[in-house]
Image (cartoon, grey):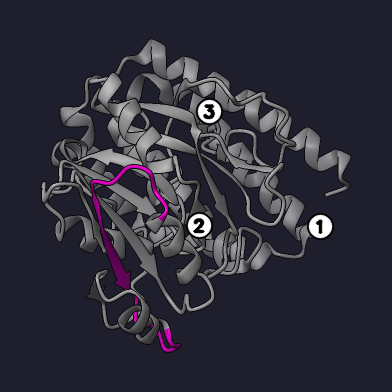
Amino acid sequence: MEITRGGAAPRVTVVIPTFNGEKFLPGCLDALARQRFVSFRVVVVDNGSTDSSLAILAERYPAVSVILMGRNTGFAPAVNAGIRGSDTELVALLNNDAEPSPEWLGELVSALDADPGAGFCASKMVDSRDPRTIESAGDCYASNGRSLPRGFLERDIGQYDTPAEVFGACAGAALYRRSLFDRVGLFDERLVSYKEDVDLDFRAWLAGIRCIYVPSAVCRHIGGATSGGRKSDLALRLGTRNGVILFFKNMPRPLLPRTLPRLLLDLSLQFGHQALKGGRAIPLARGILGAAAMMPHALRERRAIQGRAKPDIGRLRRLLREGDEEVRRHRARCRARGE
């Protein structure tokens, strides 16, 4: 699918990773066809689907470019293949279970055009089943290594209707300058899935690349439709492993005396909670052990990342404080719901 005016080359490539997404792809692609911004092409990266996804693409969306991975490689390798296969100045990533509003892509492009110092931008993602529930208003990162979407599961009463500088973007609906990938690299394929976007967020900040949240770029999202969701054992295992790895890769040395003890304490508290009440201590432990096994990779990457980093420590401290506050609010909401 390529939508342009006057035969001009498209400015944006929209990359959609999918695995057995036959239920969701039509809604996603039909929403893209309704975009008011008309300078983009669409690439679907298929992770070895065994359902009718490829047949649907061939029969109903023959203009969509398809990259076949042959097997389920996970999110990071799939989107990297799409990014490598594109040549536009801007690259949008969109989950196959997301349906952007008609203004979505145009609002993201306009935001980057208006702010040359920003390298990527985050959408306002809402629950597809209840659009008054926020899924993400950009990503936060806390001093204990926890990452969390801003406003996660809050009722939308306009509290996130103002553009803002944020730690990062959920890669389920985000727009990136190609120059960002040229400077900091693509998604870390060793992480496979979960928090690979947070890792990229961190590397971008260390390189001095800012992220802006664009509240007018609204995207409905089912969430976890093809991976089991945030509460699955897979999400807990990979999320724990990847959270530890991205911390050790990216946290600047001046902040380690404050943040490392908080990370270790939080992991201990999580394990105690899962062992006593949560019932999922095993996937959590597997995630911690997986992080230990990947630590040589993390430390090799750390040397390269920190060697070229010129972080604004003051600004990063402010973002960490905002992340700490978001975690506190989220915990209060969970307690109120009895979780």
What is the x, y in percent for residue 218? 52, 40
Outermost residue toward the top in this view = 314
Q: Are marks 2 and 3 in contact (CB under 8 Å)?
A: no
Q: Are marks 3 and 1 in contact (CB under 8 Å)?
A: no
What is the x, y in percent for residue 55? 36, 87
Give the residue drawn at x 69%, y 57%. Answer: 129
Which label number is shown at residue 143?
3
Q: Is residue 235 above or below residue 102?
A: below
Q: Secondary structure at mark 1?
A: helix
Which label number is shown at residue 98?
2
Which label number is shown at residue 276?
1
Tally of numbered tags: 3
Q: Is residue 238 left or right of residue 88?
A: right
**Would you say residue 77 sits in the magenta stretch?**
no
Which label number is shown at residue 339?
none
Q: Amino acid at mark 1?
A: Leu
Q: Amino acid at mark 3?
A: Ser
**Would you say residue 44 sits in the magenta stretch?**
yes
The mark lying in front, picked from 2 and 3, is 2
Q: Is residue 297 left or right of residue 49?
A: left
Magenta extent: 34-52
